[in-house]
Amino acid sequence: MPVQVDDIIKLLCHVSDHQKMKATIKHSARGALVAAAGAFLGGLVGGPPGIAVGGAVGGAMGAWMTSGQFKPIPQIIMELPPVQQQRLCDDIYTIVRTLDWTDATQLIMLVMGNDSLKQKVVAALINYMTKELQAEIQYGD
């Protein structure tokens, strides 16, 4: 059976929604850019002391901008480029390849009905999110 990306994506969305999983993708480059822009503007306005003040303010703003932006994992999965979705599906397929399913609904039922299999799928999803996307995972509301 060829890897059915849509079925596996639906499975991952269902499992992560069921677990109430959220993630934040770290945007350290964006934070660094804000800090640098603050230092630059501070330097233009206030000279050398302005660089220090602008850097501090820009750094604080950059840290604030990049923290706590948790999104539901199903949303993150759906927003992944096709190449990354395929890579994620390939990882999950190694877990579910022995199952015989005809559509996403059946695949979801098979995985959700087997705690061991469900845990393996969740672990692989978390591994992908943390390693490939440098995401921080959060559970619950």
Image (cartoon, rainbow, N blue to C red):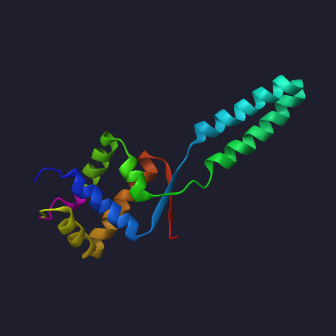
Residue at x 10% of width, y 53% of height: 1
Q: Which residues are magenta?
A: 94-100
Q: Quadrant of residue 127?
A: bottom left
Number of callouts in the render? 0
In this rendering, would 60 be left or right of 110? right
Q: Quadrant of residue 50?
A: top right
Q: Position of residue 85 (x, y in %)?
A: 31, 47
In this rendering, would 3 be left or right of 68? left
Most foreground residue, 95 or 37? 37
Residue at x 88% of width, y 23% of height: 47
Q: Position of residue 55 (x, y in %)?
A: 78, 35
Most foreground residue, 104 or 56? 104
In this rendering, would 95 be left or right of 37? left
Query: Is residue 97 a member of the stretch shown in magenta?
Result: yes
Please tell me whether residue 88 is drawn above or below residue 120 in the rendered image: above
Query: Is residue 141 a member of the stretch shown in magenta?
Result: no
Residue at x 64% of width, y 40% of height: 31
Please tell me whether residue 138 is drawn above or below residue 80 in the rendered image: below
Please tell me whether residue 28 is drawn above or below residue 15 in the rendered image: above
Residue at x 62% of width, y 52% of height: 67
Q: Position of residue 74 (x, y in %)?
A: 39, 58
